Image (cartoon, rainbow, N blue to C red):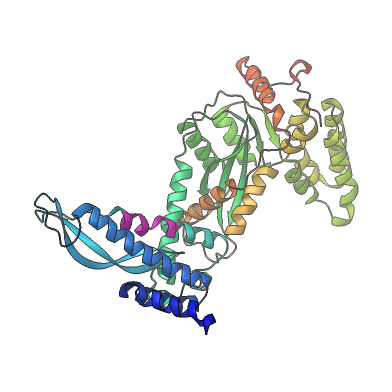
Amino acid sequence: MGSNVPVAQATMQEAVLPERVQEALGQLVGAAKEGLLALSVGVGLGVLEELMGEEVDDVVGPKGKHNAERTAVRHGHEDGAVTLGGRRVEVRRPRVRSADGESEVPLLTYEHFADRDPLARVVLERMLAGVSTRRYRRTQEPVGEEIVCSERSTSKSAVSRTFVERTREALGELMSRQLGDLRLAVMMLDGLELKGRMMIVALGITTEGVKIPLGLWEGSTENATVATALLSDLVERGLDPEQGMLFVIDGSKALRKAVRSVFGEVPVQRCLWHKERNVLGHIAERDRPPIKARLRRAWRETDYSRAIGLLRALADELERTHPGAAGSLREGMEETLTVTRLGIKGKLRRTLESTNPCESMIDCVRTTQRNVKHWSSGEMGLRWTAAGMLEAEKQFRKVIGYTQLPQLALAIERRLHLHQPNPVTTQEAAIEVTV
């Protein structure tokens, strides 16, 4: 008998709860059966309703009390929607108008939760993670059957519109970045092909080793006109062409021509791995291993004279057996050894002798685009690529060997100001970078 007293007391206490509270608790019991998240959402929407009611009281005054000096009055309720977990959820929101009836008085609580920006962020993140517009609804959290039945902005067309809007903002953000305050030590350029369309992207590395996506340009091929337009746009956005920078490119003649056109005679490093692939592409697979070994041995040399000697000897031998490979090797041969000529060694050398940092960014872009089957326009390619570049930026770390980048930039800048046609070619300007 005594053991039932606490239960009886609890029942009596529950009985005196306000009817509205009891009704809300009854609704939450149903939500709890659908899971903890559904229960939390139910509680949250109830709290939102209370917050809006309290704000109305603050603006208008307590209900039922006359106040001749009030500046606003209640004006009923209307349907509204708030953003919740990548969807729009319908709510009833109170309305308030000015006492003279001339204008609506906004409720800050409702405006905060009705903001669509969190929805756009969720859509962008899920689409870039590989969720298709058709499957978007399936990725939604289990927030309760009642809410799911009334949710909005989860259809294929709605998700697509939101994604287009968000990626357009990403493109605008990337292409409007002001670069006047950037002190770059390195700029890397590479191309990304999107089924018949070419995106040329630029990645900057500051003297502190921070990687920054600078911009992109679209064209039918990786040609000099497109690359020149990209580099000219960077200068127009404030990038100082007089600062000493090392340019690392993928080996394209078009990119080399564009760099010379916009920045003049600056030091350029051709990516070793692109060059290796180009040379070996002219040689039968069974004959490649010894050629590859000799290329890499030359590129490992720390003395420029010995390294260029080894490459020239290899080119002379290839001339007799594989003239195409010899021609590919000779094209830009000296620029495959720019980091050697600069005296860069150790970890920084491994970082700068290829476009790998830029390739890593491009790989992230490709991952975000893996489900795209058809590129309807160049603008679509630009939007997706810009969004992928900014997504990659979130994962960036400082480049390996970054502590020596300030010395590299100053040495190059010093030679540029002396109008040397081949910056930093003497032992005096060489930079010793240890492992």
Q: Main secondary structure of the magenta part?
A: helix
Taking depth in this image into account, of 303 and 280 the one nearest to the observer is 303
Is residue 145 shown to the viewer in this render?
no
Q: Position of residue 176 (x, y in %)?
A: 44, 40
Q: Position of residue 351 (x, y in %)?
A: 73, 38
Q: Quadrant of residue 113?
A: bottom left
Please provide the residue range marked out in magenta.
109-120
Q: Position of residue 25 (x, y in %)?
A: 40, 74
Q: Which residue sits furthest bottom? A: 1
Q: Which residue sits furthest right? A: 290
- Relative vertical location of residue 168 with respect to residue 345 in this rendering, above or below: below
Relative to 427, 112 lies left or right: left
Q: Which residue sits furthest front? A: 2
* Residue under the image location 51 percent in, 40 percent down: 230
- Relative vertical location of residue 285 with respect to residue 156 in this rendering, above or below: above
Q: Position of residue 409 (x, y in %)?
A: 65, 25
